[in-house]
Image: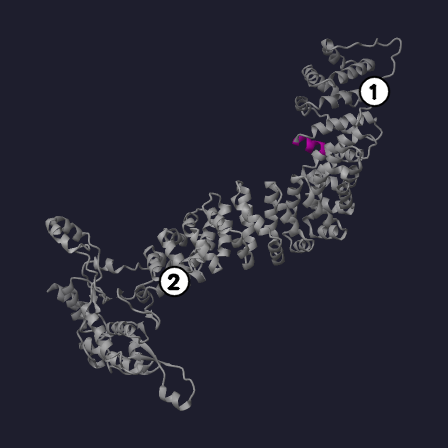
Amino acid sequence: MGKKQKKEVEASPKDAFNTLIIESKNMQTVVLMLDSPEDEILLKACEAIYKFAEKGDENKMILLALGAVPKLAKLISHDDKQIHMYATMGFGVMATNSEVRKSIRQLDFLPSIIACLAPDDDVVVHELATLCLSSMSVDFTSKVEIYEKGGMGPLIQLLSSPDPDVQKNSIECISNLVKDYVCRVALNKMNGIYPVLNLLNSEYPVIQQLALQTLITVSSDAGSRKALFQNEGHETLLQVLDTPEFSDLHADALHVLANCLEEAQNVTIIRESGALEKFLLFLAASSFPEAQRHATNAITRSARNSETRNIFHQEGLEKVLVMLLGINNDAVKIAACEAVSVMCASDSSKEAFRTEEAIFQIVPLLTSDSVEMREAATLALANLTTANSSNASAVFDAEGVEPLVKLLTEPVDGIVINAAATITNLALQEPIRASIQNCGAMTAIVEPLKSTNTSVQSKAALLVASLACDVIGRAELRNVGGLEPLVELLHSTNDEVKRNACWAVLVCGKDEPTTAELCKLGALDILQEINLSSSHKNNFSDAAVKRLLDHNAALKYCLTGYLSFDDIITDGFYDPGQIKPSMKVLTLEEHSNQEVNQHRPILLINAKRADGKGRSRGKKEEEKVKEEQSHAKTEEEERNKPWECPYDVLFDAYLSEITRNILPLISTKEQIVALAMFVSEKMGGPISKEKLHEFTWELHIAELKFELKSNIIPIGKIQKGIYYHRALLFKALADRIGISCSLVRGEYNRAWNEVMLVDQSAQDVTGLFIPPTKYIVDLVHQVGSLMRTDSPDAAHYESFTTCKHTPCKCCKQLSWYLDHFERK
């Protein structure tokens, strides 16, 4: 825009003051002249100051120092039009200096300047007044004041001025003002969108750019976007995009259109007008990465609406995003990954991305130097592979497993969360899971398990659950020390973390070595504590307890009082009696270290001999001479010898005997009856109910404890056993020869075994399948008899109702015998 010819001041009358020739050296005099009561002097002074100030910032600073600013401010509203004009011009030029603006803000000048925007004022006044307001609008406080003083309306009117300088200054001021929310709303209410759109047809690029910048800002507001569409703004913007000469405006035009995609209704309108297709084409082909980034970000926001997502999918947005993933610009790639992540909420888009080979574009981004890129890429892959096995296979085929596993060790939580989620999705397929394990995923997941970020903890626990579903995965997790931080997560106060940790423990508890380690770390105790709380208990915590107990029959029996037909008693099993869920379960070694006491003995099942390496430490025969010479060293080794479970030679002999005599029997029923008689014989024979209280098993047990100097009694040592001794021995022997039975603990030293038998004769007669019946095996009274669980005879085992003694002399543990015996 060229500078306009300013109006010349009329010639002075003859008797007027002679024309002044003003130089910078007498500028102080000129400033003083601004206080003159004579209009001619004021006019000459204002004109001189305007011309002086126009020459540069140095002159503006001189005028500021001389105090010209407040004097000029007063003259803006002067009655003489020429004084008013030059004062406004001088003030407008002065306001372009930041130091001058600081001084101006102290004055109440805005009403005078805004008054200069009146339609009947001179165009030169309009130009310099809008220049002043444009300069002042850079500062936030001035934005608010211009709006509050009523400057917005006149500025909107001047957007239609025939003078391009006025248009430029006005739109620049408005562009600054609308950065404040109140002004954005005001522009819309004052119908200012339409005149701003009209400026896109200006022949001056600077005006067009300022108009687009204004539209970018106001289109962040829903009301303004609506007004934009009502004025067919999208059509105007498309015309800009369709004009090759306006290539420098394409980026901003894309930005405005992209903002308009926020509402699904707008997307529909743009689509129906054919603008959406053009918009996507411009987006893909644009040579302005910044515009592409803004537009893609807007698409991401818009695609969070399911209706809009569907429209984008129908218009082929997935193909456009894949093209953007190939652009050599990190910001655009990041924006495209984020858009992919959001579009993946639609299954059809997931399929489209695979068809367009988006995954093969994204996987290489996992090794980018940019943290933001790696985070965006992992999020895209996590969403692409969720509930989509084909996409998971595509990630595997694109060799994404190794970089994903490496990202688990990243210090950035977002990357770890996304990588863990993606790997969890991939691990659902067994071949891929093996590859994940081979890349060291279990080692990599240990640190995320120790994270303080609950989202990281949650995803890490979930990943453990997906990788620990086979023996190899669980073994590796144990070996790398992953179980300890996993157990710690059970203490989490975050429900999701706690639930996922319970799930992981449930999966890890599928084999005995892992279960043993988990119990050693206190997992069972924590899980039981969780299950005692109604607010913290969850389905996984309950199932995890059961899973851990399934691989630890001793623990299961002392906590639940029940071993099922599938629970097998193996060597090392011990029964300390029923304990409460909140009590600590001591190991057998811990029990062995206790002093002999009057409490119930710990019954041990163990037919396994020690390996014999304790004393010699596996030394060869020729080394025995040296060992004898170092007797002191041997004694030290003996003291440090690991604790060994006592070997029960009698129980071992029982196994040999029943294998020879009972196992060969033809029917299961015969085996059960024979085994019942065997157990009864070893435990003191049949006992009538009336004489049960005379059976001095308590004294016998006390003698054994004294003899062994231990609270632990091997089951084979017991020659006088009551219900719970016999039931335990029966179960231990039955499990070794394949007789399926349960072990149930009752009250008052009661315990019994249940077996399942089919009435073969009834089945032969009817020819129909008859379900098996549950029986209790009598080991104490009518030894070998089988009682249906619902029969009266079974009640004596299950409850105390049949006993006539009060208190029960036959069942109550007589601590007096123990006291008396130990005192002796």
Viewer-nearest residue: 304 or 671? 671
In the image, is 173 to the left or to the right of 334?
right
The local secondary structure at tag 2 comes to loop
64 versus 571 height, above or below: above
Main SS, magenta region, reads helix
Viewer-nearest residue: 501 or 655? 655
In the image, is 539 to the left or to the right of 781?
right
Question: Which residue in the protein does label 2 denote?
Answer: 510
Q: Nearer the viewer, mark 1 or mark 2?
A: 2
How many marks the image carries: the answer is: 2
Which amino acid does the dot numbered 2 rest on?
A: Lys
Residue located 25% across and 60% down the image: 588
Question: Which residue in the protein does label 1 denote?
Answer: 82
The span picked out in magenta is 140-148
Mark seen at residue 1: none
- The quadrant of the picture occupied by the N terminus is top right
Residue 80 visible here? no
The local secondary structure at tag 1 comes to helix
